[in-house]
Every structure is written in structure tokens, then in C-alpha cells.
Amino acid sequence: MRGSDRRITFNGLSTIVIPAGALVVSDPIDFKLPALADLVVSLYLPDNVSLTTEHTESVQTTYISDVGDFTRAATFAASTAGAFYVVSGVEVSAQQQARAVVTLGDSVTVGFGSTPDTNRRWPDLLAERLQSNPATSKIAVVNAGVVGNRLLHDFVGTGALARLDRDVLVQPGAKYVIVLQGNADFLIPPLINTPSEIVTVEQVIQGYRQIIERGHALGLRVYGATLNPVEGYPFPGFWTDALEQSRQAINLWIRTGRAFDAVIDFDQLLRDPGSPSRLLPAYDSGDHVHPNDIGYQMMADAIDLSLFRDVDQD
């Protein structure tokens, strides 16, 4: 929007050097940001940088300029990428009663398979529902999904247990966590030929229990989501009967284990009743693992908003 540009500083300075692996926070800016608004962040890197901080498959377009500082330019020649770089989040001042739902997951939580640049990921759509409901309009959604993410091992990014503090527990205002992880723990080792990283159902359940215990210690409510069907993904050997048995065992535990504060049954919603190990075709983006826009909408619509009761009661 013309006239909405704001310059960001770091402790009063216009530049900062970020040490490898470190996190830096900018100074606050006086800028009223409406709920559900799109925000553009422009960066200028004066020297050659080998980027290692990246959110791959963001389902959002990033524009990369030619050499030079174009951070305040209205238009510029650019190449594009489907990833986020350097910036990991934006903190917004809100009313004291405001809280956040953190969605911890893999590529399904990232929204892979949805239409790019339209904010049709299920966490986006959940945020829309929360905002439209007066009883939950003070609740935001923080998407902590990472493509290929596993509970117990690293892959494209740091494993969920290892990133739990950074991405969930220390998020300002976090009150609720939705966990949708586990498929990749079973799928990835055979795919990349790492037999030492093969895990058991019991180990994945133990990982869930660790997230639950650590969340509860900080007063968070932790909700478990069942794992979606994955048969048909176009990689040889990707799906096996043993993998399906593990997925079913995990889902049975999520539904009946009474460890999570509530259960969100995405598997029941998304599966094909005639072939329960597959996505319902109407919800399939085409790769037989990731939902399409309709599927993600159904996921968001299936979440009971009473799970996020009026924060004034806390």
C-alpha cells in the first residue's frame, strides 16, 4: 500500500550483523496492522551472503532484486522464489487478553499443495475463522510448519523436539498448540536410505508425550491431530503396508490415549471411505499426500472453536 513503508532499525542503527545461528530483534515501529493483513518485509544484504536460514516451500512468492538497495523502491526488476529468507517472524503488540495458537507440523501445515499467494493453508483458514468469531477474535495463529519435518530427527529443517523451544514455547502469547507430525518420521528414512533413523510407533508416541509435558509445564493446551493418509505419493517404495500400520497405530493412540488435551481427527475427515489409506480425491492436490484448497478449508472448518475458549476466563 502506497505510503505504508516503514524503516526498521536495530537498537537505533540502520544495519546489523547477525552471527551464525543467532537471532536478532528489530526496534518496534509504530504501525497499525489490521488482522489477517499481508505484510511485506524488504531486506538489503550489502555483501555476498551464503544463506542458510531459509523456509523452503513457503507457498508464497519472494522477490529477489538485481544488485543494489531496492528496499524502498515501488517497482524493480526481480527474480522470484517460493521460499522465505532470513526473517523468521513478526511480533505484534496486542491487547493483554490476546493469545496465539501455534500449529506445529510438516508440509501439510506449511500448506503445500494449496494455491500460492492466496493464504489457503489450513492455519490461515483457521485464523480467519477465529477472527470472524467474536468469542475468539483475540486469538492469532502462528504457523510453525516445516516441509519434511520430523519429530525425532532433522531433515530439511531441525526436528520438532529440537525446535520446540524456539518455534513454540517462547512464542509471545502462545496458549494453544496443535501437533500434526509423525508421517515424515516413518516416510523419510526409507526414502533417503538412512536405516539408522528408522523409528518405532512407541518412539513417536514418546516424542508426543515430551511435547505435551513441556507444553503443560508452561500452561499451554496441547491438541493432537491425527495423521492424514499418504498412499499414492509418486516415489517408488514411499508407501508400504508396514508404514500404513504405523500410521494407523499412531492415530489410534492419538484418539484413545487421552494424553492430548483434545483430538482433531484430520484423518477421518480427509480419507477416502472406500480406500482409507488414500486421500479423498475431492481433497487431493494431486500428489496423494497434500490436500488442495478445498481439503485445507475442510481441515480448518473441522476444528472446534470451543477448544479456544474465551481467554478472559484464563
Image: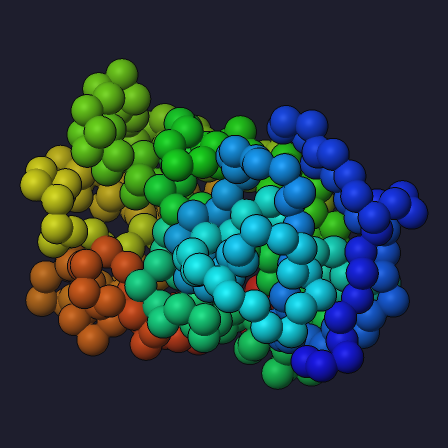
Of residues 13 and 298, the one nearer the viewer is 13
Q: Residue at x 77, y 79 (%)?
A: 3
Q: Is residue 106 above or below residue 164?
A: below
Q: Residue at x 39, y 46 (%)?
A: 147
Furthest-top residue in view? 196
Q: How is the image coloured?
A: rainbow
Q: Quadrant of the N terminus?
A: bottom right
Q: Position of residue 95 (x, y in %)?
A: 84, 67
Of residues 36 and 203, the one nearer the viewer is 36
Tell me, yes or no, if residue 5 can be seen here. Answer: yes
Tell me, yes or no, if residue 310 can be seen here. Answer: no
How many callouts does the rendering have? 0
Q: Position of residue 55 (x, y in %)?
A: 49, 47
Of residues 123 and 211, the one nearer the viewer is 123
Q: Residue at x 12, y 50 (%)?
A: 234
Q: Quadrant of residue 32?
A: bottom right
Judge left or right: residue 196 versus residue 62. Answer: left
Judge left or right: residue 141 versus residue 200. Answer: right
Judge left or right: residue 141 versus residue 248. Answer: right
Q: Is residue 198 above or below residue 1?
A: above
Q: Position of residue 21 (x, y in %)?
A: 63, 28
Q: Position of residue 42 (x, y in %)?
A: 65, 59
Furthest-right residue in view? 12
Q: Residue at x 65, y 74 (%)?
A: 74
Judge left or right: residue 127 versus residue 280. Answer: right
Q: Quadrant of the C terminus?
A: bottom right
